[in-house]
Image (tube, helix red, strand yellow):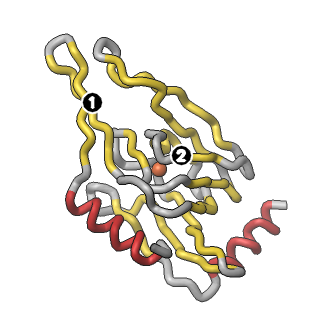
């Protein structure tokens, strides 16, 4: 069965030029193909390593990711607490299990099996994209929503390539 899914992925990305999304050290952590099939635009993602940021992030649109090959462990925010900082839960997203991500969800890929491939669909842009930074100040955790300038620019470029609006 995996060979069928590999053939399907090969068919999806045929004739599409990918681009790499770099980690902070400049090395690629995600390879992305922007694919349009039957009038539907979506991403094919090949994870090369974990989300490079220590922070959880949100998305400007609802999204659904489906591992076609491989799987990953997602970390999601449950709540913010001044005493304990960010309280999260981990969810195992197995092969072919859709992972629905609403705009108000903060998450990250905590661990990914090497060679994982996903399909990633998203809706219209309705919000922002940024990181939730938590820092212990004295005996209290403080939180800041942070949008790094170069990251926003990079993401805007991706959005322009992929958004209808
Ligand atoms: Fe994400």
Which dot marks residue 160?
A: none
Instruction: Establish if 75 lies above or below 39.
Output: above
Q: Residue furthest right?
A: 1
Instruction: Establish if 45 lies above or below 137.
Output: below
Residue placed at 59% from the left, 48% from the top? 113
Residue placed at 75% from the left, 73% from the top? 8
Residue 95 percent coordinates (x, y): 72, 49
Q: Is mark 1 within 8 Å of ligand 1?
A: no
Sort mark 1 into few (<14), some (14-19) or many (20+) by Cα contacts within 10 Å: some
97 horizontally vs 135: left or right: right
Residue 124 percent coordinates (x, y): 51, 63
Count of numbered badges drawn on the protein: 2
**Quarter residue 125 falls in:** bottom left
Between disc 1 and disc 2, the foreground one is: 2
Q: Quadrant of the C terminus?
A: bottom left
Residue placed at 76% from the left, 74% from the top? 7
Asked whether 64 or 165 is in front, the reply is 165
Q: Which residue is mark 1?
A: 134
Q: Secondary structure at mark 1?
A: strand
Q: N-terminal of the two: label 1 or label 2?
A: 2
**Quarter residue 35 falls in:** bottom right
CA–CA distance between discs 1 and 2?
Answer: 21 Å
Q: Quadrant of the N terminus?
A: bottom right
Which dot marks residue 102?
A: 2
């Amino acid at each position: 069965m995996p060979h069928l899914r590999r053939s399907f992925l090969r068919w999806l990305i045929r004739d599409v030029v990918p681009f790499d999304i770099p980690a902070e050290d400049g090395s690629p952590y995600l390879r992305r193909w922007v694919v349009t099939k039957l009038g539907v635009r979506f991403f094919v993602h090949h994870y090369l390593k974990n989300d490079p940021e220590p922070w959880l992030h949100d998305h400007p649109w609802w999204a659904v990711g489906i591992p076609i090959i491989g799987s990953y462990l997602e970390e999601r925010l449950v709540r913010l607490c001044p005493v304990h900082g960010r309280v999260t839960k981990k969810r195992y997203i197995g092969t072919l299990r859709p992972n629905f991500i609403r705009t108000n969800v903060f998450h990250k890929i905590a661990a990914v099996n090497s060679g994982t491939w996903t399909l990633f669909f998203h809706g219209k842009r309705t919000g922002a994209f940024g990181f939730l930074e938590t820092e212990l100040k004295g005996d209290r955790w403080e939180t800041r929503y942070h949008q790094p300038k170069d990251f926003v620019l990079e993401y805007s470029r991706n959005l322009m390539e992929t958004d209808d609006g």
